[in-house]
Image (cartoon, rainbow, N blue to C red):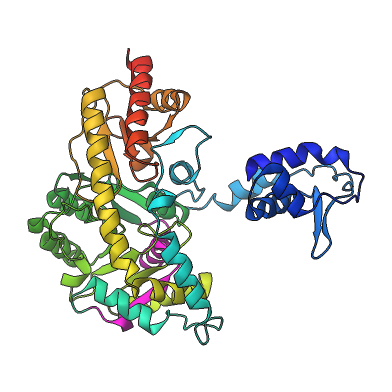
Amino acid sequence: MAELAERLRRELDRYPQGGKLPSSRVLVERFRVSPVTVSRALAQLAAEGLVVTRPGAGAFRARPRAAAPAAGDTSWQEVALSADGAADLVPRSVDASGVLVSLAAPPPGVIEFNGGYLHPPLQPERALAAALSRAGRRPGAWGRPPVEGLAELREWFARSIGGAVTAAEVLITAGGQAGLTTALRALAPPGAPVLVESPTYPGMLAIARAAGLRPVPVPVDADGVRPALLADAFRATGARVLVCQPLFQNPTGAVLAAGRRGEVLRLAREAGAFVVEDDFVRRLVHEDAGPLPRPLAADDPDGVVVHVCSLTKATSPSFRVSALAARGPVLERLRAIQVVDTFFVPRPLQEAALELVGSPAWPRHLRAIAAELRTRRDTMTAALRRELPDLALPHVPAGGYHLWLRLPDGCDEAALTAAALRAGVAVTPGRPYFSAEPPAAHLRLSFAAVAGGGEITEGVRRLRAACEEVLG
């Protein structure tokens, strides 16, 4: 589509202003492309203001736009924004770089080891399209949903969490990021400390800082967050919130050990604190993982855990349907914040989620990605050990979509990231995953956003070239 749009863009000078372009049928025959490609290319030019499309008449070269007005002077905003935060205990300026690195598409030809979502062929596109089509025909599908979410969808999420969680304790939210934002705003006032795993998900750190919270790191090891250090952090800070990812933690891939699960809940309960459980990749388990531990929320009768889970990672970045589960008075506060922020998740999207998870295609999809992610993980692990044995790979997870590498002492993480991009592979630097000074340089490599095993092998080869340039 982009190539056709560019060719049409170069040919526009052939036509007078207001002149008609060749018909779609002529363009299809001339460029040997599909009618859909022609339609999308013309839509792109229309969005740029270069052509005007008229239903039933065709596409016409647009008349020139009026001269753009002179740029205004926005320098006053530097003073206004700085003065606004002068009294804040914690600066509320937002650094989104750690999030954008996994959202931005790399340039053409660059292998995407920095992606945070499934490569399009791994996404259940046909099942999603069918679910959306069926959802749009459901009675009331375009009406206003309950602000808490559709009852049937809340029930499905409650069953998937397990334990004594009920539909009445579930709110439907617009993706895991939105759920985490609502939880942190509900549980801690501006200026308060919030305990976070170290390293941890940069998007959560950005949420906390944007809310004026002060992230306090608690180190993790191969068995998850360390209880002794967690107890020290609760005592030292008086924090009333811990955010953790007990299953396939991002970025380390660690699973909270069975012996630590109850200890984490006990420490939080004694501190009068909530545990925000970000259960973000439970549906991206690998084929060889074995039985998974239940969510912490399933073993929590006292309302300590606020649980966040989502369908997005296992489907599509645009399928932003997730759930918040909580017990006790905090549920009303969560509900109030969500209503004020977003009103509700669009009903057609909720109806589509119900259609998807209730279809035979859903379990087939989960089995397929479980097998594919295991293969990709093994391919990347083997390539790293063969091509880059000096990069430490302390843990190979049985779930999730990435590996966490420790770089040699003294390695310049930023220089290696830049060298990798020049070599044709985009990687994620480790620094944004730490809320304080990191103990060493790291890289996170995703194996889910690439086309397949061949691209993984080639990406590691390119990374080796970058390492040779930086490390010598």
Q: Quadrant of residue 69?
A: top right
Question: Horizontal placement of 411 versus 132: left or right?
Answer: left
Asked whether residue 92 is drawn in magenta, I would say: no
The quarter of the picture where the C terminus appears is top left
| Magenta residue span | 165-192
Q: Quadrant of residue 390?
A: top left
Q: Is residue 435 visible?
A: no
Please give the name of the residue rendered at 38% of the width and 50% of the height, measured from the top-left corner.
Answer: 205
Give percent across and percent down for residue 292.
16, 60
Nearest to the observer: residue 103 or residue 148: 103
Nearest to the observer: residue 74 or residue 307: 307
Give percent across and percent down for residue 317.
45, 56
Asked whether residue 189 is drawn in magenta, I would say: yes
Q: Can residue 445 be seen in this view?
A: yes
Nearest to the observer: residue 237 or residue 110: 110
The single residue placed furthest to the front in the displayed view is 29
**Numbered marks: total:** 0
The single residue placed furthest to the bottom in the displayed view is 139
Please give the name of the residue rendered at 16% of the width and 48% of the height, measured from the top-left corner.
Answer: 229
Q: In this view, does 3 lie above or below 166?
A: above
Question: Horizontal placement of 57 versus 234: left or right?
Answer: right
Q: Quadrant of residue 325?
A: bottom left
Give percent across and percent down for residue 2.
64, 42
The single residue placed furthest to the left in the displayed view is 259
Give percent across and percent down for residue 26.
76, 50
Question: Horizontal placement of 127 versus 46: left or right?
Answer: left
